[in-house]
Image (cartoon, rainbow, N blue to C red):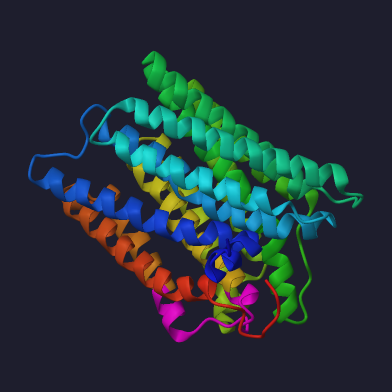
Amino acid sequence: MTTHPLLQRLAATPHRAAFLPGLLAALLLLAVWSSELLLRQQGASLHRELSPLQAHAALMLYGLFPFFMTGFILTAAPRWLNATSPARWRCVLIPLLLFTALLCALAALPGSHYWLAAAALLWLAALALLAQTMQQLLSQSTVTDRLHAQAVLAALLAGCGGLLAMLYWLLADVATAWWWMRNLALWGFLLPVFLAVSHRMLPFFTQSVIAPYQVWRPRWLLLALLGGSWLYGALAIAQLPLWPASLLLCGLSATCLYRWQSWCSRSVPLLAMLHLAFAWLPLAFLLLTLADFGLVSSLAGLHAVTVGFFITMLVGFASRVMLGHAGHPLQASRGLWWLYLLLHGVALLRVSADLLPAFALRGYVLAALSLLLGLLGWAWFGLPLLAKKRADGKPG
């Protein structure tokens, strides 16, 4: 039996196999969350057994970002390590597990919490396979600088730990296990991956388009950023003061913006997308520092990280990968640029809703619907790049 050409193209490269279901997952998640917020205005809810906020954390942390991490890691890590590309079955199976997990997790909202437990098992299988693939690439590699790949592997293992905590929360009904899950996923898994990729790629991409430019990415900086993230998570789990870690991360990320000369990227929109996304980190950790002293809501800093930094950086990196691997010039169109700026507006709206209690309920709904609209526009941009043949006629 002949496989459909579209399926052949999707399976041919890791980013196609992971990004396309990732786009669909993003739309599904935001549609469901927007519906929940609208229902809540009427005193109703989609949820039957699970707390809406606890389910929201689990779904957003594990249901969206791992797709794009998978596509990027399986594309970039072999180049970082000068290793053989992973087997095609791995590149297909991991996104398939992730998407099946998402469907199970969504079934848990109106149904039983056991559906979310099934999702956690599938997410765990996907991340464990991705971690094992990364370890395999590391074992093949003879390059001397493997720190970024090792950091990603450590983060994936922390993500697996968060899923074990999720299972303990769901199956043993231990509320503190949810708190472990949330902090392991956020500060042990997601943020370290974003930091490792940013530390490696932002100076590299900047050097390639701006001259003269001196690359600045010392090993100690990455270790300090990762250490700050892990310290923040450990302090949060132990319910100790968080300001030492948040102040450290605020200072380090602000230093990165200065030393990476982020202002020089403004003439190259596709590069500026990455630097503007990173600019959310100092603000986010400043807000988290203020929150630790009771001056603002901690949710403002949290959403500055997750919506401000994660979402905009994801769109910046994934757009670059999709354009380059579709055989198109590495140039952001006017439409993509304005769409990207819309996402920053969404992040500002979401953070403002946390800072202004009187605006909170309307702000949450507006931010969710605006993010859904923005992701719909991004899917309109990205789906043809993922589904069609390369514009330059090359394989892949």
Rendered image quadrant of residue 57 = top left
- Camera-side residue of 194 and 249: 194
- Identity of the residue drawn at 82% across and 48% down: 146
Question: Is 209 displayed left or right of 39 in the figure?
Answer: right
Q: Is the residue 316 above or below the residue 282 in the image?
A: below
Question: Is 186 displayed left or right of 307 in the figure?
Answer: right
Q: In this picture, which residue range is highlighted in magenta?
A: 323-339
- Identity of the residue drawn at 28% across and 55% down: 31
Considering every residue shown, the one lying at the far front of the view is 1
User: Residue 53's spot in the image, x, y percent?
Assistant: 29, 36
- Camera-side residue of 235 and 396: 396
Q: Quadrant of the N terminus?
A: bottom right
User: Residue 270's spot in the image, x, y percent?
Assistant: 57, 76
User: Residue 352's spot in the image, x, y percent?
Assistant: 29, 55
Residue 20 in sight in this render: yes
- Identity of the residue drawn at 39% across and 49% down: 303
- Camera-side residue of 387 and 178: 387
Judge whether residue 335 is colored magenta.
Answer: yes
Q: Is the residue 39 above or below the residue 26 in the image?
A: above
Judge whether residue 133 is colored magenta.
Answer: no
Q: Quadrant of the C terminus?
A: bottom right
